[in-house]
Image: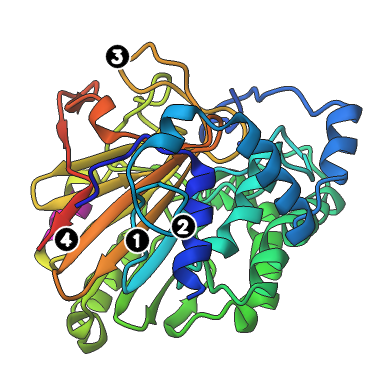
Amino acid sequence: MVSVWAVDMLALVTAEATLGGQRQHGGSSSDPAMAPSLSRRQVLSLGGLALGGAAFASWQRAQAQATPAAALAAGAGSGTGGLRLPARGDRRLVLISDLNASYGSTSYIPEVGQGIALIPSLRPDLVVCAGDMVAGQKRSLSTAQLQAMWAGFDRQVLRPLRRAGLPFAPTMGNHDASNSRVGGSYAFERERQEASRYWRRQQADLGLSFVDASGFPFFYSVLQGEMFLLVLDGSSAQIPAEQLRWAERSLASAGARGARRRLVMGHLPLLGVSQGRDTPGNVLAQSQELRQLLERHRVEAYISGHQHAYYPGRIGQLDLIQLGALGSGPRKLLGQSAAPFQTMTVLDYDWSSGQRRDSTLNMRSRQLLDPAGLPPRLSDSRGRTQVRRSAVTGG
């Protein structure tokens, strides 16, 4: 178990090199307003951010100059600059969510660029994104604008990760391809069409071992080594009943039962965790039904985004990995006054001990988040309570 958490994010990069040497945006599904567009200067600044190694090395040096002395002094691990850090597990997943900026934006805030540049050095076996990769959910956006957003995502997010050889598993968010309906039809039909076109073109080059891709990119399942991941279309509060039946069949399959770990991902969460998002429409309407389904099939965790606030929760027998935003508009947790920040989460699995370790990076302070600083429990507006779980689980 890791005893030192408040260490500089740069240190994680340094340790990985040693050991390896071996998006207030994000309007909710009904939000009419989003954060202002980036200024020309910010866009030019982003345009100058290379996602390659030279730019990241420069960023590393800048962060090194700002590294808190206390963090540098923590621990005494040999070969790691005097830092004690979580080592890479037998399998590592990097989890990101809510990357987007203002409606129609084709660029991203600096934290997104920095996070994408960082990920390859963490050497994950899989990168998982819990949705809101682009900034749609606005009917006035033209088809050309929708295509330009996906082109921007491709250039700034997906291509750098795939060039590094990293498998990438997405789920659709409400700003990517909302499945909300009006009069029996999709309210954002063109957005769903463009999302489908884009991801269908990428499907064979994502590095994923599909078990069932019949509903890709909206719902599908993959078996990545020992990990079974089922992705649901949680892009609105309603998951169709037929899709829940599909999930039941998929989780009962031999491939799912034979996997070491089973994970399920959807954009909207089971419970509200952030201020302004603990409302109907911002959490899944069938949260109890879905939770029971996942518990029946011994799913380890449900991964979600949308709330723009990180909280490592547990309810019943199910872990809730509620991801913060890497992009614009991070939010405060329920009942908390601390300033919000962008995050990225790393899961490490140790097969010998059966443990999973969750490490979450505060992309603003460049430090690992100490989960003990989060509230021990959160209760939503319906009185449902989840408890904060340990950073190390299982075993």
Disc 1 marks which residue? 87
Query: In the image, which is nearer the foreground, mark 2 or mark 3?
Result: 2
Does residue 8 belong to the magenta stretch? Answer: no
Magenta residues (range): 289-295
Q: Is residue 114 above or below residue 207?
A: above
- Would you place residue 180 above or below residue 169 in this image? above
**Closer to viewer: mark 2 or mark 4:** 2
Q: Quadrant of residue 260?
A: bottom left
Relative side of 134 to 146, left or right: left
Colour style of the rendered protein structure: rainbow
Between marks 4 and 3 in the image, the one whose residue lies nearer the viewer: 3
Quadrant containing the C terminus is: bottom left
Rendering coords of residue 67 (x, y %): 55, 32
Structural distance between the alpha carbons of marks 2 and 4: 39 Å
Marks 3 and 4: in contact by CB < 8 Å? no
Q: How many marks?
A: 4
Instruction: Find the distance from the CA under tag 4 to the CA under tag 1.
Output: 33 Å
Question: Which residue is drawn at the image coordinates 24% and 21% (left, top)?
Answer: 381
Task: Give the distance between the C-alpha atoms of the residues marked 3 and 1, in whole angstroms.
Answer: 33 Å
Residue tagged by mark 4? Answer: 293
> Dot 3 corresponds to which residue?
335
Q: Amino acid at mark 1?
A: Ala
- Up the image or down, 186 lies above or below 279; here it is below
Q: Secondary structure at mark 1?
A: loop
Q: Residues within 10 Å of mark 1 (few under 14, many from 20)?
A: some
Q: Nearer the viewer, residue 375 or 51?
A: 51
Q: Which residue is mark 2?
A: 15
Q: Is residue 277 left or right of residue 147?
A: left
Please tell me which of labels 4 and 3 falls first in the chain: 4
